[in-house]
Amino acid sequence: MKKDEILSVKSSLGNSKKRPPERRRQKNEFTLDDDSASKRLKTALVILPIVMILLVIGALIIGLNQFSSMFDSTMGESSTTSEQKKTDESKLLVVVSPESPLSSDFELALVPFESINVDEILVPDLENMLKAAKKDSMALKCEVGYVSPEQQHQLYNAEVERLMAEKNYGRSRAMEEAEKTVPAENHSEQQTGLCIVFSSVRSADFKSSDEYHWLITNGIKYGFVQRYPQGKEGSTGFEENPSLFRYVGRDNAMKLRTMDMCLDEYVRYLNSR
C-alpha cells in the first residue's frame, strides 16, 4: 500500500470510534432552581422584619400593661399609707374626758403585751422603751393597760361608794369628785388602749422611784408622756397621776415637751391653728 492510503485508513478507523454517552441525571438527585430560591429568599427578607416588629410591639404592650399595674398598685399603696397615717394621728391625739366622752366608733386594735392588753400601734415603741430601761437598770413594770367599759364602770362606782363612806359625801358630790381620779364609763382614756399604768418593782411609791424619773426623762423618746402631770389640773380636769402614761407618738411627745404642754393643751392648740 501506498503511504497515503495507509493514512486514510487510520483516519477512517479513528473517526469510527463511539463517544462515551453523556451522564443522565438521576430522578432523586437534588437540583436547585435559582429563580425559585431567589423568590423564597426575598419573601423571607420581607416577612422577617414584619415578624420582628410585631414581636417588639407585643413586648412593649406587655411591658406597658405591667408598668401600669405596678403604678396603680404603688399609687394605691401610697394612698392607703397616707390615709393610715391620718387615721393613726387622729387616734394618737384623741382626748377623752367627762366633757369629751369616747366616741362609739373609736376603733380598738388590741393585742396582748406581757400581762396586759394594749393597742398594737404602741407595741414597737413600748418594747424598745422597756429594753432601754432594762439596759439602764430600771425595774419598770406594766401594771395596767386597756380597761373595758364594764371594768371602768365598776371602778367608778367603787370610788363613789368609797367617797360616800369615808368622806361622808352625798352621792352627787361623790360622783363629781370621783370623776377627778376614777372617771366614769367612756370618760377614761384607759379605754383607748393607749394608756399604761407603770409601777416600780423596787419601790411602792412610784413618784419617788428611779423608774418614774427615768420615764419622765426618756419616755418622750418613745412616744410616752405623763397623761395627768402636776400643775396641769386646770387643763386636764384630773388630779396628778404619776403612774399613768399615754402614748402619743414620738413626734407629738417631743413637741409636748418642747412647748411644755399637756395633751389637752396641745390638742386645743392644734385645733386653733
Image (spheres, helix red, strand yellow):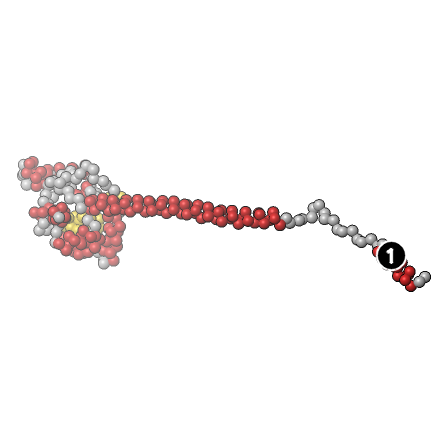
Tell me the kind of residue under disc 1: Ser
Q: Residue 13 in the image: x percent, y percent?
A: 87, 56
Q: Residue 101 in the image: x percent, y percent?
A: 14, 39
Q: Residue 76 in the image: x percent, y percent?
A: 30, 44
How many numbered badges does the structure rendering display? Answer: 1
Q: Residue 61 in the image: x percent, y percent?
A: 41, 45
Q: Secondary structure at mark 1?
A: helix
In what quadrant of the picture does the N terminus appear?
bottom right
Instruction: Report whether residue 157 is seen.
Output: yes
Q: Residue at x 72, y 48 (%)?
A: 25
Q: Residue at x 91, y 63 (%)?
A: 3
Image quadrant in which you'd find residue 90 = top left
Nearer to us in this view, 63 or 242:
63
User: Going by the image, does 170 lie left or right of 7?
Assistant: left
Give the answer, above or below, for where 136 lies relative to 195.
below
Nearer to us in this view, 200 or 97:
97
Instruction: Report whether residue 162 is seen.
Output: no
Residue farthest bottom in this picture: 3
User: Going by the image, does 1 lie left or right of 174?
Assistant: right
Nearer to us in this view, 148 or 55:
55
Nearer to us in this view, 83 or 213:
83
Few, some or many residues within 10 Å of mark 1 (<14, 14–19, 20+): few
User: Going by the image, does 111 lie left or right of 241?
Assistant: right
Q: Which residue is mark 1?
A: 12
Q: Residue at x 80, y 54 (%)?
A: 19
